[in-house]
């Protein structure tokens, strides 16, 4: 890394990490953990060593840190989960410690499902739903805590500007929905039926723990810290 290129910056935003989509083989799990934990630790150590470090280090995390919690409302102070994704997120956030210990304000951005039709999960869902082949995942009762791409970017900008904002920040909309609700809304917007559910047993057979911890897990997350800082949503529902 070119340390001199980082000297004198006001802020660093760190979003890098191995794509978590796909079957979680041992090799895939190792890549997911290594890319997040070691990458963040290395960058935090470099920033901490600079004569002119940035004032703020905003680093990605995820609401997967809470685990599968049903309809419990989760804030930044809620207990953390103990599955694979939760353990990765705990280590990921902890890896930024060298920056915090050197006086850099660290913000752990716990992203929910980021939605935009030009990329990510929504782009992948649209073709099937436009053909009328969409449907709920499992029984559809699991909560989806989401945020639009525009609001996610604005939340990062808020984290950089507000010196009182530090530690974990849930980057989600104030209105999580169940997967069944999400499915109905998307189908209605596209004027298509959504009658083909993905059974739980099929998902588990195809994707194993990734399906269990990502597609079937329920996280009803509240953006308490964003609300405390009067964040204004473009897309609140």
Image (spheres, grey):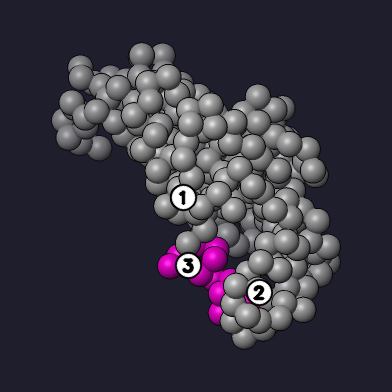
User: Does residue 95 appear in the picture of this structure?
Assistant: no
**In the rendered image of this protein, does residue 46 appear above or below residue 101?**
below
What residue is disc 1 on? Answer: 234
On residue 187, the disc is 2
How many numbered tags mark residues here?
Answer: 3
Q: Nearer the viewer, residue 75 or 68?
A: 75
Precedes in sequence: disc 3 or disc 2: 3
Whole-Å distance between the Cαs marked 3 and 2? 14 Å
Q: Nearer the viewer, residue 71 or 66?
A: 71
Density class for disc 1 (Cα within 10 Å; few <14, some 14-19, many ≥20) is: few
Of all residues, the one furthest to the bottom in this rendering is 131
Q: Please give the name of the residue rendered at 37% of the width and 21% of the height, measured from the top-left corner.
A: 163
Question: Relative to 72, is 215 on the left or the right?
Answer: left
What residue is disc 3 on? Answer: 117
Q: Can you tell which quarter of the image residue 3 is in?
A: top left
Precedes in sequence: disc 2 or disc 1: 2
Q: Please give the name of the residue rendered at 75% of the width and 63% of the height, measured from the top-left corner.
A: 180
Question: Relative to 75, is 198 on the left or the right?
Answer: right
The location of residue 191, given as percent across then percent down, is 63, 80
Q: Please say whether residue 211 is one of the residues in the magenta stretch.
A: no
Whole-Å distance between the Cαs marked 2 and 1? 22 Å
């Amino acid at each position: 890394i070119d340390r001199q290129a980082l000297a004198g910056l006001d802020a660093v935003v760190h979003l890098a990490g191995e794509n978590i989509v796909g079957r979680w083989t041992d090799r895939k799990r190792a890549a997911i953990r290594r890319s997040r934990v070691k990458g963040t630790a290395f960058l935090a150590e470099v920033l901490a060593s600079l004569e002119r470090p940035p004032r703020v280090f905003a680093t990605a995390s995820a609401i997967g840190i809470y685990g599968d919690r049903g309809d419990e409302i989760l804030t930044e102070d809620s207990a953390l989960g103990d599955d694979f994704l939760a353990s990765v997120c705990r280590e990921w956030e902890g890896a930024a410690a060298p920056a915090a210990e050197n006086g850099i304000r660290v913000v752990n951005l716990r992203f929910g499902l980021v939605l935009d039709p030009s990329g990510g999960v929504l782009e992948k869902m649209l073709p099937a739903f436009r053909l009328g082949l969409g449907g709920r995942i499992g029984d559809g009762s699991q909560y989806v805590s989401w945020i639009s791409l525009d609001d996610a970017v604005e939340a990062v900008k808020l984290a950089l500007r507000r010196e009182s904002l530090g530690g974990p920040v849930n980057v989600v909309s104030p209105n999580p929905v169940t997967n069944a609700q999400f499915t109905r809304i998307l189908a209605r917007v596209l004027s298509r039926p959504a009658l083909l559910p993905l059974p739980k047993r099929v998902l588990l057979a195809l994707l194993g723990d990734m399906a269990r911890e990502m597609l079937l897990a329920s996280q009803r997350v509240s953006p308490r810290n964003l609300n405390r800082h009067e964040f204004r949503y473009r897309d609140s529902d």
